[in-house]
Image: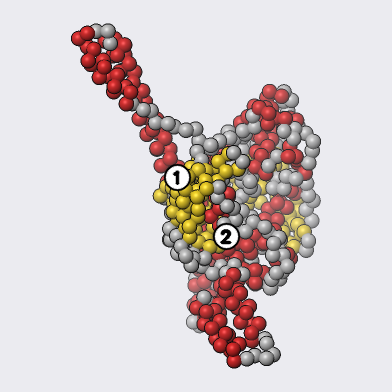
Amino acid sequence: MISANNVTYRVGKKALFEDVNIKFTEGNCYGIIGANGAGKSTFLKILSGQLETTNGEIAITPGQRLSFLEQDHEKYNDQIVLDTVIQGNKKLYEIGKEKDELYAKPDFSDEDGIRAAELESEYAEMGGYEAESDAESLLNGLGIEDEYHYQKVGDLNGAQKVKVLLARALFGNPDILLLDEPTNHLDLDAIAWLEEFLINFPNIVIVVSHDRYFLNKVCTDIADIDYGKITLYAGNYDFWYESSQLMIRQMKEANKKKEEKIKELKEFISRFSANASKSKQATSRKRALEKIELDEIKPSSRKYPFIDFRPDREIGNEVLTVEHLSKTIGGVKLLDDVSFVVKHDDKIAFVGSQEQAKTALFEILMGNMEPDSGTYKWGVTTSQSYFKKDNTELFNTEEDITQWLTGYSQIKDVTYVRGFLGRMLFRGEDGVKKVKVLSGGEKVRCQLSSMMISGANCLIFDEPTNHLDMESISALNDGMIKFPGVELIACRDHQVVQTTANRIIEILPGGGIIDKDTDYDTYLEQDADARKRTVYVADTSADGDTSEDAE
């Protein structure tokens, strides 16, 4: 068990939270939620001991091991991938290292033999002899294949490094597992694997995530940081949302009844206080009035933007034709003879582990990159707006937010432009902030503003949920669902993909594609069935059935 006892944490004079009392118990997965700046990551750092509380204490059951997902992606660049994962269980790794050093001594003594026997016993009890295979299973499950296991972490790309750090946190069955945004930089396959891992994990998990589908899949409880307090709700994210909204509605209804009663009592007192025959009743009602207290309904720290993509013109039947596109970057074949036709009612999710391939495809379709071969053609009625995953160049300017967004608008009126900024929670003095100093989430909201103001009827999204809080993701999801035009989407958020897309194109390793008119969950079910059939064929073949038609 791990608990926070009367914990207060202040930044300067501001208290992020005060007098927090909460217990996390074995067998449960707790989702930590709250608006940006509420203190979710800070609370995890306090639990892990990386930050000291202003007041109060964190208590952990003696002897339990705590593991957390580290955020420094370059920390282990000089180490071997497999060793980095096994070091997640520091004690096990050190025992193994000491044992190996003893056996390597040229003058191995009797005392060394006694110590080696002790270490062997402890090492075996901790599962040391399965450590390497366990670490490999974690890496493979997350999509880090065998060929990378003995390379240095520094030789991997950014997404692979994140997966190594995640495998390190998961390794060795820790008693308490703390995960801050574990799905960031993971592809949908890796997220699905992580979901299953955590569902079957027997100990305590405490996770911060903006992925609603992920929280719904893995969480048994939700800890909501709001009003400077942390409130625990049983159930997953959807249950928390319904429960919290119901509580607010009930408080408002109770207040309404109280206000009606107050009005009734005041009217009686005003009418009969001077009447001798009614004076006792008036006095009694005064006492009753004094006892009525309205429930305090504090405004939530959560802020929801309003995202509404409205095309200036209706899209025609001819939208986009892609024929035989191929692209190789850095010796890696990303797209290989890719062909598809986009229809006027398509919302297509591009899935698969090849993130660079999706970005390359979108860059080609927007004219920012040349294909090695093949062609594409947009219909004459189409207009495109593109959400770039790497927005560095977009904000490398001295312009303020209003000037920046005006560049995307056909109407150059400042009031008109600021209206779009207001919808995205940029108000008042925010309009004169320089875009180059904006946070990651603010830049994403600016990009979405530019897509709204463009009036395009074909929207291309390359990981639009990165850096957004849950409220902004919910608003974006609603806007994408309501949009009447065409959408091409690459997104790690399962719920966004499932609720928006009516067609799935998976880009396979090697650059080929699978194209299905279906929603994402159905596609995954069909894919799972295909995998089962493949396993069945392999099993029957092993028993002597070599028929090519075996299913």
Residue name at image x 69 percent, y 35 percent: 450
Tag of residue 231:
1
Specify the color scheme.
secondary structure
Report the front residue among 321 and 520: 520
Name the element at disc 2.
strand
Quadrant occupied by the N terminus = bottom left
Residue name at image x 50 percent, y 78 percent: 125
Q: Image check: 439 left or right of 288?
A: right
What's the amino acid at mark 1? Answer: Thr
Q: Which residue is mark 2?
A: 68
Q: Vertically, is 437 above or below 350?
A: above
What residue occupies the far front of the structure in this picture?
A: 55
Report the front residue among 346 and 102: 102
Q: How many marks?
A: 2
Few, some or many residues within 10 Å of mark 2 (<14, 14–19, 20+)? many
Tag of residue 430:
none
Q: Image check: 168 left or right of 201?
A: right
- The part of the image, by quadrant, that contains residue 101 is bottom right
Name the element at disc 1.
strand
Q: State the separation of the CA atoms marked 1 and 2.
A: 22 Å
What's the amino acid at mark 2? Answer: Phe
Question: Can residue 420 be seen from the camera position used here?
Answer: no
Question: Can residue 157 be seen from the camera position used here?
Answer: yes
Provide residue 420's location: percent of width, then percent of height: 65, 30
Provide residue 245's location: percent of width, then percent of height: 43, 38
Report the front residue among 496 and 47: 47
Looking at marks 1 and 2 on the same chain, the residue that comes earlier in the sequence is marked by 2
Q: Vertically, is 345 above or below 4?
A: above
Q: Vertically, is 353 above or below 128?
A: above
Report the front residue among 70 and 440: 70
Residue name at image x 60 percent, y 56 percent: 50
